[in-house]
Image (cartoon, helix red, strand yellow):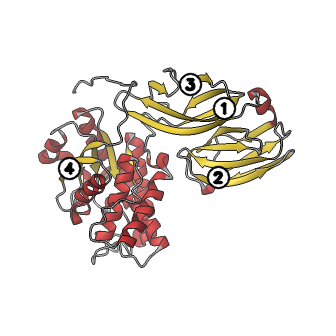
């Protein structure tokens, strides 16, 4: 196993431009329309660069790749940032017992080969899509694949299981297909064989990969291949919402350094709480290198915070503007009168305000860690409300509270 140089520059100079080395192992679903090249061109148009290679024999399975000297040689050729693994299009949709024998062991074997070459390489499982009218050839043997919806659900379950078992990212291309079809079924994502992707399907896959690998928004990217501007913009938007609204669902950042944070205020003193359990080193824009720092800003106002978190292989950063009121809010008093239960939650969370220590009613926003507001609610004194969390993806959210006097604070909500 290669040695890792632990150069954790938490004096880090963060660069807007990224360069990634990516290997694609799959079959014709990757090869058709040259998916890696579309991803390369999307990245280039946004100022990023990709060095890539691929090995995509027709009909290849994980089992085929795991024993093929050519595939293994590709894995060992250099220290890749990502190795993308795409299974044969039908196998992961089969009965779970069959998948446990024919797919999962070989996914694990390939992941092991990848990390034997370089422990810091990230495995990415390429979740493919259900065939347009289901899998007619296997329908009699396993009825769930008789329809597109049934086949797609099994693919989702199997790829997410592979991601969890191997602590790997999942590129949710199949879910992006599902979202696009639900919004506009007239846009053809399939080739004439109703299985392989059309150019629009491959472009949607590429935008999904760009968001998955770079955690960047593809919306507005100037590379549109041979598509019309309107079609490309639509597919960019579908990919962005599929990936960036649900990062933890796809394990993006889940098993690596994650710079997202929450905070509580007590007057002008702010307690910051890192949301990462895999980070071992931290840097905050106001100084210090502790995991969960406390900082007194001395005055109220808006402050921009940059947090950098590092694990043994890489670093992540996030910048967020927080508001501090000059009016003191004692955290113990706050917790006494504002109740959020249960937290973590599975299907419903109750928020109650027993006494309003603020000047008026509270405005509550349910937000993703990326700052997207997904629900806004008003909470009055001696009242409670129930939030149906079944409509949200699993992961970490922020409950952001504010009043008309400028008091603001947030609480972390975990959905399991």
Density class for disc 2 (Cα within 10 Å; few <14, some 14-19, many ≥20) is some
- Foreground tag (2 vs 4): 2
Query: What residue is drawn where x is 24% and y is 46%?
Result: 22
Density class for disc 1 (Cα within 10 Å; few <14, some 14-19, many ≥20) is many
Q: Residue 133 location, x and y as percent?
A: 38, 75
Q: Give the SS element for disc 2.
A: helix
CA gap between label 2 and label 4 equals 40 Å
Q: Give the SS element for disc 3.
A: loop
Question: Which of pointers 2 and 4 lies earlier in the amino acid sequence?
Answer: 4
Question: Which of pointers 1 and 3 lies earlier in the amino acid sequence?
Answer: 1
Query: What residue is drawn where x is 36% and y is 68%?
Result: 232
Disc 2 designates what residue? 389
Question: Which of pointers 4 and 3 lies earlier in the amino acid sequence?
Answer: 4
Q: Residue 294 location, x and y as percent?
A: 61, 23
Image quadrant holding the C terminus, namely: top right
CA gap between label 4 and label 3 equals 44 Å
Mark number, residue 65: 4
Q: Residue 274 location, x and y as percent?
A: 54, 31
Query: What residue is drawn where x is 48% and y is 35%?
Result: 259
Are circles 4 and 1 on residues that touch, CB within 8 Å?
no
Density class for disc 3 (Cα within 10 Å; few <14, some 14-19, many ≥20) is some
Q: Tell me: 252 left or right of 365.
A: left
- Foreground tag (2 vs 3): 3
């Amino acid at each position: 196993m290669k040695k890792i140089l632990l150069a954790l520059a938490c004096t880090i100079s963060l660069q807007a431009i990224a360069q990634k080395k990516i290997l694609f192992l799959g079959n014709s679903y990757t090869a058709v329309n040259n998916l890696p090249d579309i991803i390369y061109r999307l990245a280039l148009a946004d100022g990023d660069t990709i060095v890539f290679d691929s090995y995509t024999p027709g009909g290849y399975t994980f089992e085929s790749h795991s024993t093929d000297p050519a595939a293994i040689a590709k894995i060992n050729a250099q220290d890749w940032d990502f190795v993308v693994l795409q299974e044969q299009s039908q196998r992961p949709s089969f009965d779970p017992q069959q998948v446990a024998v024919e797919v999962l062991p070989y996914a694990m074997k390939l992941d092991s080969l990848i990390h034997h070459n370089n422990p810091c390489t990230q495995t990415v499982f390429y979740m493919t899509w259900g065939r347009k009218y289901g899998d007619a050839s296997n329908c009699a043997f396993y009825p769930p694949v008789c329809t597109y919806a049934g086949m797609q659900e099994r693919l989702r379950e199997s790829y997410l299981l592979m991601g969890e078992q191997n602590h790997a990212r999942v590129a949710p291309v199949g879910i992006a297909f599902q979202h696009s079809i639900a919004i506009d079924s007239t846009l053809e994502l399939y080739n004439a064989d109703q299985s392989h992707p059309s150019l629009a399907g491959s472009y949607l896959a590429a935008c999904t990969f760009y968001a998955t690998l770079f955690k960047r928004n593809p919306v507005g990217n100037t590379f549109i291949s041979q598509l019309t501007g309107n079609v490309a913009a639509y597919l960019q938007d579908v990919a962005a919402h599929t990936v960036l609204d649900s990062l933890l669902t796809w394990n993006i950042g889940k098993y690596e350094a994650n710079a997202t944070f929450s905070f509580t205020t007590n007057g002008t003193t702010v307690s910051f709480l890192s949301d990462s359990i895999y980070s071992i080193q931290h840097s905050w824009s106001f100084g210090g290198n502790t995991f969960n720092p406390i900082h007194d800003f001395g005055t109220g106002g808006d402050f921009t915070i940059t947090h950098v978190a590092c694990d043994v292989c890489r670093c992540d950063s996030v910048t967020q503007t927080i508001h501090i009121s000059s009016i003191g809010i004692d955290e113990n008093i706050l917790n006494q009168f504002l109740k959020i239960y249960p937290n973590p939650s599975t299907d419903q969370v109750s928020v109650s305000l027993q006494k309003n220590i603020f000047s008026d009613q509270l405005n509550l926003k349910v937000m993703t860690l990326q700052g997207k507001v997904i629900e806004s609610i008003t909470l009055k004194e001696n009242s409670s409300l129930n939030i149906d969390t079944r409509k949200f993806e699993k992961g970490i959210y922020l409950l952001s509270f504010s009043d008309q006097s400028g008091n603001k604070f947030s609480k972390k909500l975990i959905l399991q």
